[in-house]
Amino acid sequence: MLLQADAATPVTGGKTTRKPGICLLTETYYPVVGGGETQARVLAEDLVARGFRVIVVTRRSSSTLAKVERIGGVLVYRTSPVGGGQLKRWIMVFACVPVLLGRRRQYDLIYVSGFKALGLTAVAVSRLLGKRCILKADSNGEMSGAFFDRGRQTLGLGSDSALFRLFLALRNSVLRRADQFLAISTDIAGELQHHGIQRDAIELVTNSVDTNRFCPVNPSAKSALRLRLRLPPDRVIVTFTGRLVSYKGLPLLLRVWEQVQGVHSRAMLLLVGSGGLDIHNCEAELKRQVQARGLQHSVRFTGDVHNVHEYLQASDIFVFPTEKEAFGISLVEAMACGLPVITTPTGGIKDFLVDGQNGLLVEAGSFQQLYAAIHQLLTDASLAGSLGSAALSTARARYARDVVLEQHIALFDRLAGLRVKACALRGRWASRWILHPIEFFIQPLARARRRRSIKVSQ
């Protein structure tokens, strides 16, 4: 059959007659663990539960992952290249095209979570097929190009390199053709606008937290959790959750903790997570610091865990001394568990954390301020309780899973309800000279994929 663009979702009286199909395009997806992967999975499964047709197109980051499978009611297609490595992000820009074209009848909108590279593919395919395209910025610097600093430096290119500026200009000229941009913080929204995205094409839609899972527990349940997690029942537990990377302020936290221990011997620091494959991984360095400073009995590492909420529920205070942050989902999860929090006014955190009202803010990199904040919460139970209650109210009112889901649904319905302009590639000339050749190359790939996924229920 000739590859051609699908008709736009029918409209009646300005409203769609059916819920739009969504293709969620993301570099990595569950069971890969991470903030972006968690957000993508939550959104996909919640949309399916609400009757939307959802597929996920992602990269097969490990050879142990199935090429096609259904997870939580969501059909997941994994494409090449297999394995880790920064270069493979760019290879996927091209490798995912056959899947997007072959599954074109299953979706009306392409939603990209983290558009730094895959945004190019999404815009090109959506224009070819007459689909809507939504680009969500998961990190600071995705539009400005700052996100690529490490890779650029590896290639020996300066920020003023003519080659890099040309690449960025060409990439951004394509990305600007997306129908909608989503920003998870006001900082990112400002970055998008600064780089040429019209204000009315930017919508502030934050990340979400499952407040049914991340929630406070009563004292008896807390004691039971500590017993099961093998945590001391009689100590005050100060917890960090997230990747163990240097820009989260963790080397500083350990230096501060050495001084905290000199005053508060009953306090214990719990570091939940690992450094993983992040280039800023400092897990090994942190463990060496613990040994060198004699903190083995007051600092504990959990490694990667899938029950982060239980560790938070078993804790007393949350500390997050990050130096840079796009949003701070770990922080919001702790707030949803009713913990008093200590953090820095960076990135998206400024949007929801008010010093002295629903948490304590310290300057990033400040030893004295971080020590003073931890000491204050360890000695003032009344303050800790009031900050925890206010933090819980903030998390439930602004970041509950159903609140953010409704924002997405309203956006999808609005975009699907707008008639898609006739794509320039729909004419007879384009069908003959562009679509026919594409079909010629992707048909064998599509047939092979269908054979491999014949057992997967459509």
Image: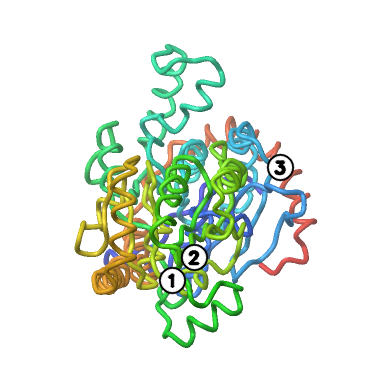
- Name above or below for residue 60 compared with residue 360: above
The residue under label 2 is which amino acid type?
Val
Disc 2, disc 1: CB below 8 Å? Answer: yes
Q: Quadrant of the C terminus?
A: bottom right
The Cα–Cα distance between marks 2 and 3, rounded to whole angstroms, is: 24 Å
Can you name the residue that lies furthest to the top here? 162
Q: In this view, does 203 lie to the left or right of 142?
A: left
SS class of the residue under badge 2? helix
Disc number at residue 42? 2
Disc number at residue 39? none
Mark nearer the N terminus (2 vs 3): 2
Q: In this view, does 158 lie to the left or right of 77?
A: left
**Where residue 259 appears, x then y in whole percent?**
41, 50
Closest to the observer, 399 or 328: 328
Q: Mark 1 points at which residue?
A: 210
Disc 2, disc 3: CB below 8 Å? Answer: no
Mark nearer the N terminus (2 vs 1): 2
The residue under label 1 is which amino acid type?
Asp
Count all numbered tags in the image, as a single digit: 3
Q: Name the residue under label 3.
A: 83
Query: Can residue 135 be seen in this snapshot?
Result: no
**Where residue 8 appears, x then y in whole percent?**
43, 55
Closest to the observer, 84 or 329: 329
**Where residue 361 appears, x then y in whole percent?**
26, 52
Closest to the observer, 430 or 344: 344
SS class of the residue under badge 3? loop
The residue under label 3 is which amino acid type?
Gly
- Name above or below for residue 251 compared with residue 242: above
